[in-house]
Image: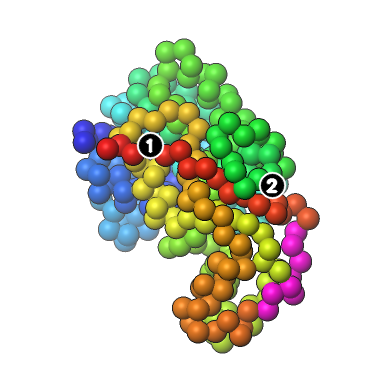
Amino acid sequence: MTSRRVLLTGATGFVGRQIHRCLLEAGHLVVAAVRPDSVAKLEQGGLAAEIAVIDDVFAVTADDWAGHCNGIDAVIHAAWYVNPRDYLDSRENIRCVAGSMALAEGAMRAGVGHFIGVGTCAEYRLPSDHLTIDHPLEPKTLYAASKIAVFQMLQQMFKTGGPIFSWCRIFYLHGEGEYPQRLVPYVRQKLEQGQVAKLSKGTQLRDFLNVREAGAMIAGVVDSGQAGPINICSGVGVRLRDFIEAIADEYGRRDLLEFGTADIHPSDPAAVVGVCNVISAG
């Protein structure tokens, strides 16, 4: 594989740190664009990288991004506002759209050869247990609508003389560095403390993938050069109850799972399962 110089935003995030690790393992040179308060986190993680300290990646002008992208072969834009309390409907999503377009414009001016964005399965019309990349798009939240906006604008922006454009739509990730408020950390915490985990009926069908695998898939796009939408998923539908029971079996404590106590949110789709189209770099 040819070593490339990759600018990575969101390098210390849940998905970004895994992308970062996999890029380094593949022999690429990483320029991590991080906030001043994230530099120590990057260094403590043992991830060797050139660091571009940026106060707010969504406030940088296209001109400044062009400077940061000088000598860069590929950009992976993994940064976004993802506070679990309100990211689905926060107006911060609008700021992320503007900031993402500035980054793309700067990358284009600098002659970057490949731009890789990170989207979401929530862009698709849901529910569905067979989400191909050609499935209709129909956002239900400001977050999903904002991701679609960036995807569609970049498609048009890059189609004449721009860089290769890849759009990685991630599905239901779990694993290292996950927010404590999310389902899997919540269940594990309750089981470790010997407390009851209050859950919905668990009838939802989901496409679960470990974040390490997701990071490897996204990092691999640098080498494969795969363009267009890419489903970052397992391609396997698992009933939520079965997934949670498998976790409880690690502790031998299915008795602490209380299904049917928590309501399923009205906007929570009955099924979200992707068809994986990731091409191996070979």
Query: Which residue lies at the image location 21% right of the left edge and 36% below the top edge?
Result: 1
Query: Which residue lies at the image location 62% right of the left edge and 48% below the top edge?
Result: 129
Rendered view: 237 above or below 33: below
Hey, what amino acid is under mark 1? Ile
Figure quadrant of residue 152: top right
Task: Provide residue 272's location: percent of width, then percent of height.
Answer: 62, 50
Tell me where the magenta segment starts and ends, as one range.
258-265
* Left or right: 232, with 195 as reference point: left
Rendered view: 127 above or below 71: below
Disc 2 vs disc 1: Cβ atoms closer than 8 Å? Answer: no
**What number of labels is visible?**
2
Figure quadrant of residue 134: top right
Query: Which residue lies at the image location 31% right of the left edge and 29% below the top edge?
Result: 72
Query: Which residue lies at the image location 75% right of the left edge and 52% below the top edge?
Result: 267
Q: Looking at the picture, tell me which residue is in the foreground, 274 or 165.
A: 274
Residue that carries the numbered disc 1 in the rendered image: 279
Colour scheme: rainbow
Q: Secondary structure at mark 2?
A: loop
Rendered view: 154 above or below 131: above
Determine the main secondary structure of the stretch shown in magenta: loop
